[in-house]
Amino acid sequence: MRFKVVSKYKKIVVLTGAGISAESGIETFRAKDGLWEKYKLEDVATLDGYQRDPELVLDFYNKRRQSFCLGENKPNAAHYALAELEQKFDGDFLLVTQNIDDLHEQAGSKSVIHMHGELLKVRCAKTNQVIPWAVDLTSDDFCTCCQYPLPLRPHIVWFGEMPIGLDIIYHHLAQADLFIAIGTSGTVYPAAGFVEEAKSAGADSIEVNLERNEHSHFDTILEGKASQLVPELVKNLLA
């Protein structure tokens, strides 16, 4: 595959989804056997669920955090390739991820927005002060930013909540001349609309996915594993 070399671009936005982390062993919502299968999404991934049974929600995220902290999941070749692209690209680069893991950061990426939050952080529900957190979170853990301390909650964007950093993301999309989406379903908004935002600004668009989405609006579609295709894509862009 051949593409314009990266020097032809001035502003690149990359969106990554569950598909890139799945190759590092992190379960997706759609996994038929795993942690998600044992819980209902409305119980552990909504504010109502948290308010109804905070212990259940905390236990769910504690289990996921424990596996992260044990180092069971490592960045794969796609993560490292994106870090290399950012490092060697002289223009404006933004990596937006729907994933709550820190595999991009482990691989060396710097300019990252976690639009759905981060598992290794917690926050105050009132002030939104964010705190790094690598141990279990309990109902006895309170914020220190409020006059009357409140229980800390997972720094996760639950269904029905506003994704993080949308103003920054849309600002970059409006100026992008290359938009790349990797391992996303292309069905969940607002992220599903990012390609149209970028294309309306005149950007080229590339999608990397295991299977072709029949409703895809991308100029170029690459079918296969991200760990195989993304390094090749980056190599071509940097040629």
Image (spheres, rainbow, N blue to C red):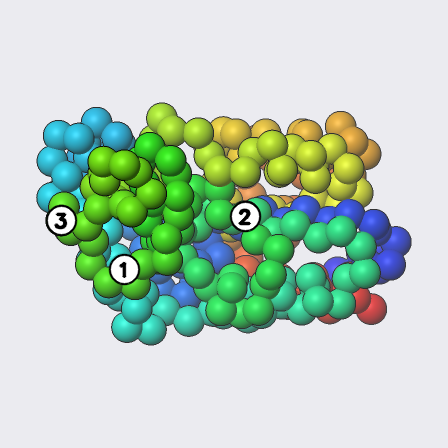
Q: Nearer the viewer, mark 3 or mark 1?
A: 3
Separation of residues labelled 3 and 1 (CA atoms): 18 Å
Q: What kind of residue is marked 2?
A: Ile
- Residue at the (13%, 49%) spot, across then down: 140
Identify which amino acid the numbered label 1 is placed on.
Arg
In whole angstroms, how far apart are the C-alphas of marks 2 and 1?
19 Å
Instruction: Decide which of tag 2 and tag 3 comes sooner along the chain.
Output: 2
- Please give left or right for residue 225 compared with residue 219 in the image: left
- Residue at 77% in and 62% down: 89
Q: Quadrant of residue 49?
A: top left
The location of residue 228, given as percent across then percent down, is 57, 67
Front one among 4 and 96: 96
Residue identified by numbered label 1 = 65
Q: Quadrant of the C terminus?
A: bottom right
CA neighbours of label 1 inside 10 A, class few (<14), some (14 to 19), many (20+): many
Few, some or many C-alpha atoms within 10 Å of disc 2 (few <14, some 14-19, many ≥20)? many
Dot 3 lies on which element?
A: loop
The residue that label 2 is drawn on is 113
- Residue 140 shows which numbered tag? 3
Residue 174, image x and y in percent? 74, 33
State the residue lying farthest toward the front: 147
Left or right: 11 in relation to 216: right
Q: Name which residue lies at 76% across and 51% down.
A: 92
Residue 85 quadrant: bottom right
